[in-house]
Amino acid sequence: MSSLELRKVIKHYPSGGETVRAVDGVSLSVHPGELVALYGPSGSGKTTLLELAAGLLAPDTGSVHFGGREISRLPPGDSAIYRRRDVGLVFQAFHLISGASALDNAAVKLLADGMTLRKAREQARPWLERVGLGARFDHTPARLSMGERQRIAIARALVNEPRLLLTDEPTGNLDSKRSREILALLRDICEEREIPGLLVTHDPQAISFTSRVFTLRDGRLREGLDAELALAHSL
């Protein structure tokens, strides 16, 4: 089993003559079987950190490791294969195919990896059922609510039975009951499959479903929930 390792990672951006320190010397280990929550205000660098872990961005300095490989230095083709085969990635934007059914949207990663349509649909069905969309297989995104679209994106992330789970606000469009169900599912997947999971979230319910909590502010990471955020979540 593999851990996700970020080692002294720095990612800065120029903006209006200034430098935005999105990720500023972050080191973090996420171990097999645990789901780790990452909190922080908007613009704190949470999504950048997730994209670095996914190999979508390369750090300015430092490194990202998973499965015995330095993800941050993979060639583009190998990086795409890493995301397709090893990673369950949930974006804030759903990136669903508008004219495709829920079932085919959930199966798209398998199809991209060369699986037949029939087999990909068979593998996607139980995941749609597990997120509560067993009666929506044939519905296109236009016929579904925002919360249902989000659950398709979560099923799509899990359909390849990933070795690493990276999720960006996976409960952002869900009601409290469905949020608890999805958080429990993500926690259970990490525990059952003994894989590491990193959860970027503003959802205060997430704390009780995660192994550890970190706060990212101004690109700097520290363990625990920031007192200001804790107060905001209690209101």
Image: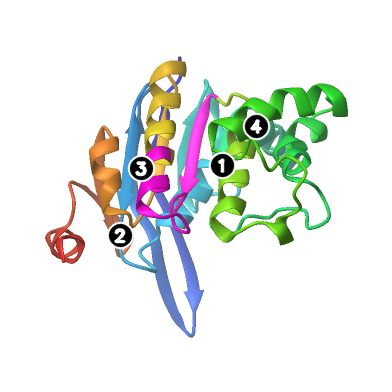
User: Which of the two discs, 1 and 3, labels the residue nearer the N terminus?
Assistant: 1
The tag on residue 40 is: 2
Q: Nearer the viewer, mark 2 or mark 1?
A: 1
Place of residue 15 in the rendered image (x, y in percent of width and height, measured from the top left): 49, 79
Q: Label 1 neighbourhood size at 10 Å, few (<14), some (14-19), many (20+)?
A: many
Amino acid under disc 4: Tyr
Asked if the stretch drawn in magenta spans residue 166, the answer is yes
Q: State the residue position of label 1.
A: 154
Q: Quickly name the residue at label 4.
A: 82
Q: Nearer the viewer, mark 2 or mark 4?
A: 2
Where in the figure is residue 1, as x and y percent of width and height? 45, 14
Classify 167 as above or below 173: above
| Above-or-below relation of 229 to 122 | below
Quarter location, residue 69: top right
Question: Which stretch is magenta?
Answer: 163-181
Q: CA distance from mark 3 to mark 2?
A: 20 Å
Q: Residue at x 33, y 48 (%)?
A: 38
Q: Which label sits on residue 27?
A: none
Query: With 225 as the anchor, is 75 left or right in this view?
Result: right
Q: Residues within 10 Å of mark 4 (few under 14, many from 20)?
A: some
Find disc 3 in the rendering and name its residue. 180
